Amino acid sequence: MHCRLIACDIDGTLLRPDRSLGDLTRKVLIKCLNRGIVVVLVTGRRPRSALRVAQDIDPRVRVIANDGAICLRQDPISIIHQLQIPRKQALPLIRSGLARKLPTYVYHATLNGPDIYHCGDFGLPQARHYAALTRAGEIRRVDDLCLLQREPSKIAMMGAETLLSEVHRQHELGSSATIMWDSYLRIHWLTVIRDGVDKSTGLARLAASLHVRPEQLVAFGDNYNDITMFRWAHTSVAVQNAVDDLKETASTVTNTNSNEGVARYIQKHVLAADD
């Protein structure tokens, strides 16, 4: 197949279980870039966290962060576009999470200073671990999240799946919200972005700006927030460790992220086809 764009999720897909990037994966993606194929990381991660992965690959790699809400480029590092959650939608969500004593996080699209705000960990060790994983200066504890004036690009809360489902039902959240299992922190997350925004809309916007059609790209993923992207892309590839619902949506399934399944698929079906 003639591929002009590779769209790939990060955690559970591109990175190995220990969150490291395999040498084969880096080598294959750079070969794609050298052939003029656009490589974009499409992730639920916040911008700066996603950019660090992109920088570990190549300066030409683009990023779509916060599940489609923000598009960035590296050279120079800049936000191309972003879509935020209106305060009238954000505030009731935040209050719902805090009322259930769920560690709740508000994310802002900024490349300087803190971009994550929270009120505390409510005794959850996973919340303390998440804070420890975040670089100093990028996360800040505040007394009241509802006093933040800027509209957030994403809201997330972690905890028991039953409580997260209650929040989801209470606010009648649609495709802009996803409940997913975090295999690294061993806990469920509920993530919410602006209504009508998901990975497919962010990818479609970028592809259109590059004059790339859905049949000219390959999408890779592993989790529920990749389903809309898979439905939009002509060719969608799930890693073997993906959730069953995604594998059922995918065009095909490749090896696991442990065995660098993304790179192996690209070698065989993208680069070899262009030779």
Image: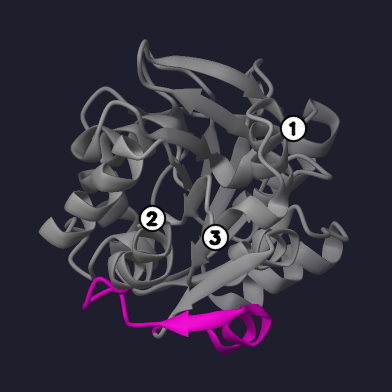
* Residue 142 is at least partly visible in this image: yes
Of badges 2 and 1, the one in the foreground is: 2
Mark-to-mark CA distance, 3 and 2: 12 Å
- Of tags 3 and 2, which is closer to the observer? 3
Can you identify the residue that label 2 sits on? 10
Tell me the element at label 1.
loop
- Do callouts 2 and 1 mark residues in contact (Cβ within 8 Å)? no
Q: Is residue 137 left or right of residue 180?
A: left
Left or right, 69 with reference to 175 = left
Asked whether 138 or 21 is in front, the reply is: 21
Characterize the local packing of mark 1: few (<14), some (14-19) or many (20 or more) Cα atoms within 10 angstroms.
many
Percent across and percent down for residue 122 are: 42, 56
SS class, disc 2: helix
Q: Label 2: few (<14), some or many (≥20) within 10 Å?
A: many
**Residue matched to label 3:** 219
Can you give x and y, in whole percent of width and height, for residue 130 in the image?
30, 52
Q: Which residue is mark 1?
A: 85
The kind of residue on which mark 1 rests is Ile
Amino acid at the residue labelled 3: Ala
Q: Range of the magenta residues?
A: 241-261
| The residue positioned farthest toward the front in the image shown | 275
Dot 3 alpha-carbon crowd within 10 angstroms: few under 14, some 14 to 19, many 20 or more: many
**Residue ID at (21%, 78%):** 259
Q: Quadrant of residue 209?
A: top right
Left or right: 137 as drawn, with respect to 206:
left
Observer-nearest of 174 and 199: 199
Q: Looking at this view, is 70 or 98 the one in front? A: 70
Amino acid identity at mark 2:
Ile
Residue 158: % across, % down: 50, 61
